[in-house]
Amino acid sequence: MGKVVSVIFISMDGVVEEPAWTAPFWTDEHGKFQAGQLHGCRALLLGRVTYDGMSVAWPAMEEAGEDVGEVNRMPKYVASTTLKNPTWNATVIDGDVAEAVAKLKAEDDGDLLVYGSGELVNCLIKHGLLDELKLFLHPVVVGKGKRLFADGIDTTAWCLAGTHTFSGGAVVLDYRPAQPPAA
């Protein structure tokens, strides 16, 4: 069975929207880390807003390197009720997202990688489908914007599985769902 792994850029105040604020902290280390996330992953799983932005930007960067080409060729699954004619090697999940993702996880051992897509991440957590949450924490307070966790999400416990610190000040906090205490 495959895993669902989320890598999401987040500010110190929890903002995940329009992450242009990450640019001052970007180093070559970030690119290598992101490339490492792609290896072993069989497809991207995206929300529509993230898909819309990536499907415009990534094909235009084809000459930028091997990893860009890998992302462009990789299958994508997009959770959306409004996307009708996907491009960029994408399939729309327009029904029950939790059911569709559970089926995708069961299909093979490769990971499904989620970039951004805050609403999708909330849905996956709600249904116990997110196996790993990598918060790419940037040392900046943005002050406004969409936060990762929606009001009303159920309390869920996570265990810190690892960290990675970058010279530019960003830190990846790698979390896995906590196992319930033994009865």
Image: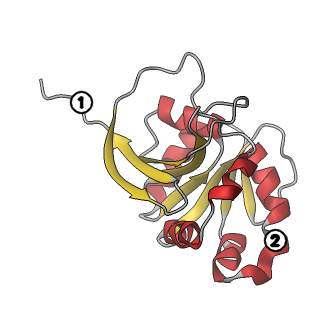
Q: Circle 1: is it few (<14), some (14-19), or many (20+) Cα within 10 Å? A: few
Q: Position of residue 122 (x, y in %)?
A: 56, 32
Of pointers 1 and 2, the one earlier in the residue sequence: 2
Q: CA distance from mark 1 to mark 2?
A: 43 Å
Quarter of the figure with the C terminus: top left
In the foreground, 34 or 69: 34
Circle on res. 15 = none
Quarter holding the N terminus? bottom left
Q: Residue furthest top?
A: 152
Mark 2 is surrounded, within 10 Å at the Cα level, by few (under 14), some (14 to 19) or many (20 or more) other residues, namely: some
According to the picture, the residue beneath numbered tag 2 turns out to be 59
Which residue is drawn at the image coordinates 84% and 39% (left, top)? Answer: 82
The residue at which mark 1 appears reads as 180
Q: x and y percent of residue 107 in the render?
A: 48, 59
Asked whether 80 or 136 is in front, the reply is 136
| Picture residue at 66% right of the left edge, 66% below the top | 75
What is the quadrant of residue 80 in the picture?
top right
Residue 86, above or below 123:
below
Q: Amino acid at mark 1?
A: Pro
Helix, strand or loop status at disc 1: loop
Q: Nearer the viewer, residue 156 or 20?
A: 20
- Residue 170 or residue 93, whichever sits in front: 170
Q: Is residue 91 left or right of residue 122?
A: right
Return the x and y of residue 19 as percentages of the image width and height: 71, 47
Relative to 99, is 81 on the left or the right?
A: right
Q: Secondary structure at mark 2?
A: helix
Residue 1 at least partly seen: no
